[in-house]
Amino acid sequence: MRKINRRNFIRIAGGAAAVSAIGFPAIAAAGGKKQVVIVGGGTAGATAAKYIRRADDSVEVTLIEPNEHYYTCYMSNEVIGGNRKLESLKFGYDGLRKHGVTVVQDTVIAIDAAARNVTTKGGKSFSYDRCIVAPGISFRDNIEGYDAAAAEKFPHAWKAGTQTALLRGQLEAMADGGTVLIAPPPNPFRCPPGPYERACQIASYLKTHKPKSKILIIDSKDKFSKQALFQQAWERHYPGMIEWKKAADTGGGIIRVDAKAGTVSTDFDDMKVDVANIIPAQQAGVIAAAAGLTDDSGWCPVTGQTFESTIHKGIHVIGDSAIAAPLPKSGYAANSEAKVVAAAVVDLVNGREAGTPSWVNTCYSVVAPDDGISVAMVYNLVDGKVAKVEGSGGLTPMDSSPADRKREVQYAYSWFNNITHDTFH
Amino acid sequence: MSAGKTYALILGSGLLLGAGQLSAAPTASMLGDTCAGCHGTDGVSMGPAAPNIAGLSETYFTDTMLAFKSGDRPATVMGRIAKGYSEEEIKLMAGFFATKPMVSTGQKLDPAKVVAGEKLYSKNCSKCHDEYGSLADDDAGILASQWLPYLTYTMVDFKAGTREMPKKMKKKVDALSDAELEALLQFFASQQ
C-alpha cells in the first residue's frame, strides 16, 4: 500500500520526533511524497494513473476500483453482433502496477474534500494532495419499472461485461422473424453513436442468421450522432430491416417497462417484443453525487484547463462523469482528458502552474464488416473553456469510397488495440 | 534536452502570449500524447493498420501533417485531425516523435515474399529508403517494420495517383508488377 502511514512517514521524513508532533493531513506539507488518489479504473482513471507515473515517478498514485477487471464499453457492440469475443474487452491492472501504481480493489464511499481524504467500503482511508474522480456513469430512473430485475429481462448493455453477454444471449435465443427493440437514452449520455452502431451490429447478425427479423429503434430524441451516415448504412447494408422512430413519433420514447408482464411502453402503446435493449438516461457515477461533485444536471462541473471540480477544490473529475462539452462522453475523450489532468496534477503537486491543455477525440463506428465511419475533432482552451478548434474535425464524408470505408474498419480496430494498450499497459 | 522541448520552452516563455484569448502553445508531450489513442503510446502502434509514427524525422513528420492539412495527401481521418493544429504545434509534435524509439511490430509475413522483396529493394529503393527503410534521417518515412496494411494502402494511393510519388520513385514503381510491389512491402514490413 502506498498511502502514507506512520511507518513510511519515518522513512520519508527521517525524524522520529516529527511523528508525534505532526498530524496526518500535514504530512504532505511536511515534504513527504505527493499522494494522488484516483477513484475509478476505467479508461479515464487508468490512463491518468499511468500518465502521472510516466511524468513524475516520485508521485505516489493509488487507484481504487471495485472490480478486478474492466470491460471496455467500446467495441462491445461487436460482441453483441457476434463478431468479437467478450474476453477481448477485458483488461486487468497488472500493467498499471508495473508503472508503480498501487491498485486497491475496493469501493470508495466518501470523499472529504476539506480533509483531503477518501474512505472505502472496506474501511480503508487514503489521504491525498490531489484526487481524481472517474467513476463513469450511473443510470437515472427515467423509465418506470426499470429496476435491477428489469435490467436482467431487458438488458441495457451500456456497462460492458455480464450485461453485454446477456443481450448477446437473448439475440442468439431469438427465433427468426423476431423483433429487437433498441431504446436509446436522452442526451447527454455515454457514447453518442453507440445505440445506432449497435443497430448495425445486430442487423449484421440477423441478416445472416435470422433474416426475417426486424430492429425497431424507439428513440427519446429527434436526432442523433452521425445520423445521415448511419441511415445511409442501414439503407445500404440492411434495407428494410431497421426502423427508427424519433421521439416526436411516440410521445417521447419508452417511458415504462413491466418485467413480469414482459411489456415495454411508450406514452401511446404497450408492446411485447422478442428482445428489448433498454438504455436508461444517465448521470455521473454514484460516488460523484455522494461526494457532492454533481450539479442539478447530475453531472460534474469542472474548469476547462485542469478539470478541477468547480464545487470542491483539490478534486479533478474526468471521463463520462465530467461536464466536458464540447468534448463528448467517449473512450477517446476520457483518455485525452486523463492526460491533460495527469500533466496538470503533476504540475500542481510540484508547485508549478498547470500548462496549456490540448485534446483530441476520434470515434469510430463499425456499421458493417467492411464499412467503418468516424467523427473526429481537435479541442483547445479558449477563455478558460474547452473549445473545438475551428476548421478541424468532422465526419466521414457521405460519399467516401468503399475502399476508404474498409480502411476505417481497420483503423477502428487499430484504435481499439492502441487506446486499450495506452490505458492499461 | 530535445529540440522539441527547447522549442516548447521558448514558446512557453511568452513569445506567443500576445495572441489574445488563446493560451501559450501546449508542450510537445501534451500534443504528442493525444495521438496515442490511434497510434499507440509514444507512437508505437499495436496495429493492425494504424502506422507507427515513433522515430520519424522531424522533416518527414511535419511535411506529412502539412500535406494532410492542405489535402495534398489523401486520408480517411488524418486530414480532419491535421486541420486542428498550427504549423508551430505540428513542429512540436514532430520533435516529440523524432525522439521516440522505433519498436518492431513483429507481424506475421510470408518468408518467400520477404526474400523476393529484398532483391527488389536493393535494386530499386535503397538509394532513398536507406538502411532497409529504417533510417529516419533520409526523410522518406520509416518503412522498416511498418504495419503491412498501412504500407499497402499507401502503395494503392500512389498507384491510383491520389498521392503523388517523387519522379524517381514513380519510374521504379511503374516498372514493377503488383506481385513485385507486394514482395517489396512484405520485405519492408519484415525489417526489425
Image (cartoon, helix red, strand yellow):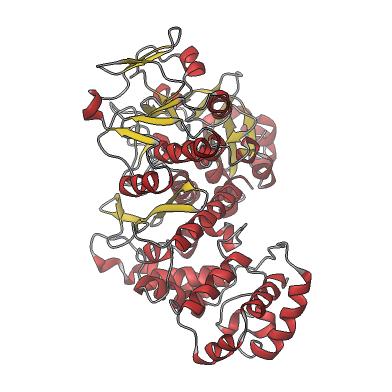
- How many numbered discs sit on the rendered protein? 0
Whether residue B30 is visible here, answered yes or no, is yes
The x, y position of residue A88, in whole percent, is 63, 41
Instruction: Name the residue rendered at 70%, 75% in the picture.
Output: B187
The x, y position of residue A190, in whole percent, is 41, 36
Task: Identify whether A343 is placed above or below B155.
Answer: above
- Is A238 in front, or is B144? A238
Task: Identify whether A149 is placed above or below A175.
Answer: above
- Is B110 in front, or is A204? A204
Instruction: Name the residue rendered at 45%, 82% in the picture.
Output: B164
The x, y position of residue A111, in whole percent, is 47, 26
Query: What is the quadrant of the N terminus of chain A in the image?
Result: top right
The x, y position of residue B128, in whole percent, is 60, 88
Q: Is residue A296 left or right of residue A12?
A: left
Q: Is residue A132 left or right of residue A386?
A: right
Determine which quarter of the picture holds residue B72. Answer: bottom left
Determine which quarter of the picture holds residue A220. Answer: top left
Instruction: Name the residue rendered at 48%, 31% in the picture.
Output: A135
- Is A290 in front, or is B66? B66
Whether residue B10 is visible here, answered yes or no, is no
Task: Identify whether A392 is placed above or below A138.
Answer: below
Determine which quarter of the picture holds residue A325. Answer: top left
